[in-house]
Amino acid sequence: MNKKQIAVIGSGMIRKEEIRNLTENLGEKLIDNDFRIICGGKEGVMEAVCKGARRSKNYKEGMIVGILPSLERLDANPYVDIVITTGMSYARNQIIISSADVVIAIQGGAGTLSEIAFAWQYDKPIIVLKNTGGWAEKLTEVRLNERKREPIIGANNVEEIITYLKNTFKT
Amino acid sequence: MNKKQIAVIGSGMIRKEEIRNLTENLGEKLIDNDFRIICGGKEGVMEAVCKGARRSKNYKEGMIVGILPSLERLDANPYVDIVITTGMSYARNQIIISSADVVIAIQGGAGTLSEIAFAWQYDKPIIVLKNTGGWAEKLTEVRLNERKREPIIGANNVEEIITYLKNTFKT
Amino acid sequence: MNKKQIAVIGSGMIRKEEIRNLTENLGEKLIDNDFRIICGGKEGVMEAVCKGARRSKNYKEGMIVGILPSLERLDANPYVDIVITTGMSYARNQIIISSADVVIAIQGGAGTLSEIAFAWQYDKPIIVLKNTGGWAEKLTEVRLNERKREPIIGANNVEEIITYLKNTFKT
Amino acid sequence: MNKKQIAVIGSGMIRKEEIRNLTENLGEKLIDNDFRIICGGKEGVMEAVCKGARRSKNYKEGMIVGILPSLERLDANPYVDIVITTGMSYARNQIIISSADVVIAIQGGAGTLSEIAFAWQYDKPIIVLKNTGGWAEKLTEVRLNERKREPIIGANNVEEIITYLKNTFKT
């Protein structure tokens, strides 16, 4: 069976060292638990999650996918294994989200907001890491519309995210 | 000079007659003032704005553009003049937004939220009609991230929207 | 009933005056017969067909649609009425083709070839103007695969194209 | 350094056992030589190349990427490791091609033709396996337009393809 694909989305710029550490830690733990990471392939949260992923002892080449808005492979951060160039600008957000089993948001500005909105529409479970600011924080426990589905889940820390994923997929 | 292109976005379903009337009125007034309407081409707010547009005495064939997510022209509401089928699912939201001079949101769920987020990223002026509920209402005067740009503008009624547009483009 | 939408595709650069004249003439005749023109919005065949269209006495604002690969409206030629910016590079070819009732190819290089291939897959009638060189000429009467559908039609001149369109849609 | 990404494109249906065997053999040899395979993720040539890839002793999970036109992961053939759902219909062809270092075509109908045209425009080296019929065969040594670039390369067999790739990337 294929590895579960976890989209990690968030700001393209990280200002606080603490958030960088959290995101790297998330990347490491996702790989420890044998998930594949899908992200936008660029800087900030995207780079941190990829960098952390490479640190895991369970890391094997091919576990980190970056889906870029541009046609330019060099836009990818150096920790991405598989670079998908879409040439479709932010429309690539749809591809990241629709390819994911679960979507995890950290911090996040307008781009992340569009991805969370897509995730809601495509009925993907959405977990936001609380206390990281940005849209991730604002949307904790929020429902984006009246559709009957699981609300956006707020996690207090990386461990809660991993527990959620293990409960969801390993049973 | 080409007509200014105004994207009108919002829920695919309207529950309150009052919002339908407001939206139809917006469509009519946009055409009265010689703007072109760009929308998602489907039901709800999209259909109401197109229906109202056709009612304007200034309406001429070609002023109403619907950009569909599907490849199926029959998904368009009957008031659209020009049906663009994208076959790209919600990625078509990028096309609606990037083609607009100004984006107006009425009510709106997750799809509208993704469009507002795109509009923010593409630096489009965004006006939300207040008191219509949904994301339009929640995002009044909000800034989606730290980017230095005009915040989301809240309009109390259709007249304020038209005044904004006239001030912006007719000077 | 909506105007029929005719995609006109072809090279982004025209080298022979004769082809420019033919293409402008096609644009004029399409509008004379009340069709809407959809094209890639840029130079070469795209610009010539739009320029000719504006010359028709039947031309009304809104009859010429340009669907651009970029996010930059200024990439459109000056004869386009409605500029759709996709930001999706050549993936926008799908949008031009799927939005058309009939696809007409003049001359044409690799981009046009991809559009003809899309037109074949989306089951759109395809007419190539013979003796204009490029892929339009090479594919006259060709079947792109074994699918049971009308082969690519070769037209000897603009009049034959218009006759085909009138026979197809006006009966 | 990342693995080189080789797009393998071709018909969604294979009629001759010989072509299936050739394609499976190509998949196996690509993985033997440590390339990553990118394909459309579906049946026919796409499935055969993935199936062969899994047979290689060098195969490791993550070496086979399928980029689907739909939003439906179950449309992927069972040999794909990483399923990217685009929801963008044939516009996904751009993503397959632009993400590749080299494009290899086997047999192929209209869809493959659009991919070869994209590959030409994105300046990707294109190798067609001769004697497999379809567009792969017809375009051997052909130049799609006047752009100064390497013409489409015809390979007589899988070995020639592998030799080309090794010469290109291993020096």
Image (cartoon, coloured by chain):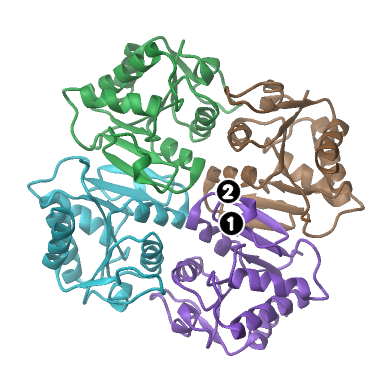
Chain colours: A cyan, B purple, C brown, D green
Please state which of residues C96 and C171 is positioned toward the viewer in this rendering.
C171
Q: Is residue C72 left or right of residue C36?
A: left
In terms of secondary structure, where does tag 2 sit?
loop
Q: Residues within 10 Å of mark 2 (few under 14, many from 20)?
A: many
Q: Is residue A24 visible?
A: no
Q: Which residue is mark 1?
A: B68
- Amino acid type at circle 1 is Leu
The secondary structure type at the circle numbered 1 is strand
Relative placement, left or right, of A39 versus C50 is left
Q: Chain of mark 1?
A: B
- The x, y position of residue A6, in whole percent, is 25, 54
Q: Give residue D42's quadrant in the image.
A: top left
Location of the N terminus of chain D (image quadrant):
top left
Residue at 35%, 75% in the rendered image: A143
Residue A137 image position (x, y, % from top left): 27, 76
x then y, percent, for residue C74: 65, 57
Q: Is residue D68 left or right of residue C161?
A: left
Badge 2 and badge 1 in a common chain: yes
Taking the spot 40% from the left edge, 66% from the top edge, the residue there is A117
Location of residue A134 with respect to C109 vertically, above or below: below
Q: Which residue is label 2 attached to?
A: B71
Indicate the chain on which mark 2 is placed: B
Q: In which quarter of the view is residue C60 placed?
A: bottom right
The percent position of residue C61, horizontal first and vertical second, equals 81, 60
